[in-house]
Amino acid sequence: GRPPLSGFPRMLVSGPPSPPSPPYRLGRLTLPIYLAVVGLGGTALLVALGLAADWSAVEIGLAHVTLAAFLVLGELMPIRVPGHEDEVNTSTSFSFALLLIVGLAPAAIAQAIASAAADVRLGKSLGSVLFNVGQYTISLAAAGVVLTLVAGDPLAAAALHPEDLPALLAAGATFFVVNNALAGAAYAIHARVPVVGHLFSDLSFQAWTATLVLGFSPVVIAVANYDAFLLPFLLLPLMAIYRAGREARLSEHQALHDQLTELPNRVLFRRCADEAIAAAAGGNTRVAVLIMDLNRFKEINDTLGHLHGDLLLQQVASRLRETVRVGDTVARLGGDEFAILLPRIGGIEGAELLAKRVLTALKQPVVINGVSLTVEASIGMACFPEHGDGVDVLVQRADVAMYVAKSARVGVQAYVEEQDDHSIERLELAAELRSAIDGGQMVLHYQPQLDLATGRLIAAEGLMRWDHPTRGLIPPDVFITLAENTGAIRQLTSRALVLAVSECRRWRQTGLSIGVSVNVSAQDALDEDLPHEIERLLARYDVPPSELELELTESMLMADPQRASSVLEALSAMGVRIAIDDFGTGYSSLAYLKRLPIDHIKIDRSFVMNMEIERNDALIVESTVDLARNLGLKTIAEGIENEECRARLAAMGCDVGQGFHFSRPVAPDAFLAWATDRVAAERLAA
Ligand code: C2E
Ligand code: CA
Ligand code: CA
């Protein structure tokens, strides 16, 4: 998520410090000039030191060569510390030791070679290589000067004594201060934050690491003086720290990243958003939080299997990564939900542009094991400071906007504060829906279906209501579409099936032999797992399959006739009944329906209720009844509100009737009482 550090000068501890705060004025050339002065100046100093040194007085032994080698090793293998983007360079332990035992010029040259080697390996630019060489040379030179000033003769340090301690401390402190100031200033100029403020920002960590690294030098010297052969043993503790650091970083990485996509997870996303908000606070930049959800991902997952689903998520992740800019954060929040953090934008338009780019990038078909899939997504956006001042509010509001985008099918939607109460209410409901289903807030009310010829109660339709803790009973037309558009419908249908089948068992246990019907949506009818689910359910409650009827609308059968018909065949083979709901409102022909295993046709209530006033509607009802009879299908009329309507339908030969005339849909207990009375009355009449 953070900008990569390429080309950045390294401190003793190097890495990007906390995000920049409000910009202040600096010329565009300030940074290049500064980098050039340190780089070229320091390198010139290095050359001068090399030329001026009295090399005949310098004895290069095995110990010195070994130390120089370790120095290079330390540069190439910086220790990574969890919780910090920074790295600790142990090379300094050895360059400082070299400074003390062989003098400034050899130490500076060894350090320059090591630093340049590491930088070249990392592919840094010539400018950065020079800057780092210059920075180290100046720092070592400053330390060397202080050492000479305090101790008199630097080479006297070849055998350390307690009296040398003040000189060591002074030289170490000088190295630390100069080195950090040189690198810190470069970053501060680059990020346009006050130099002094930045230098102190991570000071305790820097000082702590410097103490460890510099404080190790006397030990290195002692060992080198005792016997060069023992020097390699010094690497052991360093290797232990290196490995521990690597493992800690790895487990930190795992704790903060999603395993499947390698993207940051929710925790890391929140952390980045927190930082971005803190950095933007008070300034005139904004932070945008985008929440993205794939449309119909569950369908893909169910149809093609989880393996394909996982591969698809990985593809989506890499497209997101490619689409955002350096510095933006893409995270996977879970399932098919992703988040994007734009830490510095001018306005919401910028975020919208990016969101559209993301949607376009996703529209290119994804080919997975030869199957080509098109992914569509919905994105909701919220901005700091307009829409909230904390991560949680922003994520929640972006989520709300995402639901709007999804249900309105608009792709991208920014959060809007209650433009209209109705949509806000719907959004809140959408957000609560899944947990409400799991939390048992869904109830089925039952409406009786009677044989129109004999007047006998034969079945009941289960109609869903949401028993909301604060809003009371919510009717299905408010939340069914919501569930369909947010992918919660499958869960809802499963719930309806469990409620209906278990209630049917209760009826049977009290001696009522009536069937139950459940409404299913298009997405359910395409789920090849549905028949198995129903089979298990019926077995669990010991309810015969013929007692369960599923109501489907014609339009859902037309969506994917092939697949729907295979699901229906499986259900029908089990003995489960199928009814076509709302018949007459769609486009399907009876001829087509004939090829499907259908038992009942439910004539839409709009025709039934209008029969008295609209002659056409009466004709439609009558011809539907006739046609169905010719095809061997039974008809159910819904929406019977009075006796006249009932009598007319009975005369037409319609088989079953349902409507307020008999009973409104009522709660389970009320239905059981009504049904018991009704059946008792039937028996008396018989
Ligand atoms: P639907 O399947 O056509 O259900 C019949 C609707 O007609 C019910 O509305 C019922 O209360 C109403 N109704 C019954 N008799 C009369 C009458 O004589 N006059 C009038 N005016 N209306 C009558 P409800 O319960 O509000 O359900 C509305 C729709 O919500 C249902 O229409 C169905 O499409 C959907 N729905 C309900 N429960 C579920 C469910 O569990 N799953 C799914 N997928 N959809 C459901
Ligand atoms: Ca129905
Ligand atoms: Ca209906």
Image (cartoon, rainbow, N blue to C red):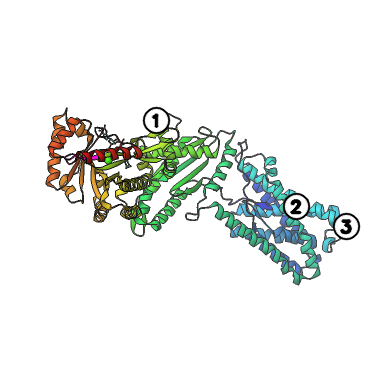
Distance from the alpha carbon under mark 2 to that under mark 3: 20 Å
Q: For the residue carrying disc 3, how many other residues have a C-alpha within 10 Å: few (<14), some (14-19), or many (20+)?
A: few
Chain part drawn in magenta: 449-454
**Disc sitting over residue 175 in the figure:** 2
Q: For the residue carrying disc 2, how many other residues have a C-alpha within 10 Å: few (<14), some (14-19), or many (20+)?
A: many
Q: Does the beta carbon at disc 2 come under 8 Å from ligand 1? A: no
Residue under numbered circle 3: 163
Residue at the far front in the pictured view? 684
| Element class at badge 1 | helix
Mark 2 and mark 3 lie on one chain; the one further toward the N terminus is: 3
Please say if the residues under marks 2 and 3 sit with CB atoms less than 8 Å apart: no
* Quadrant where ligand 2 appears: top left
Q: Does the beta carbon at disc 3 come under 8 Å from ligand 1? A: no
Identify residue type, mark 3: Glu
Q: Say if 136 sits above or below 285 in the image.
A: below
Could one spot residue 410 in this view of the protein?
A: no
Q: Quadrant of residue 94?
A: bottom right
In this view, the mark in front (1 or 3): 1
**Disc sitting over residue 422 in the figure:** 1
Query: Would residue 170 be found to the left or right of residue 44 on screen?
Result: right
Identify residue type, mark 1: His
Residue 22 located within the stretch drawn in magenta: no
| Element class at badge 2 | helix
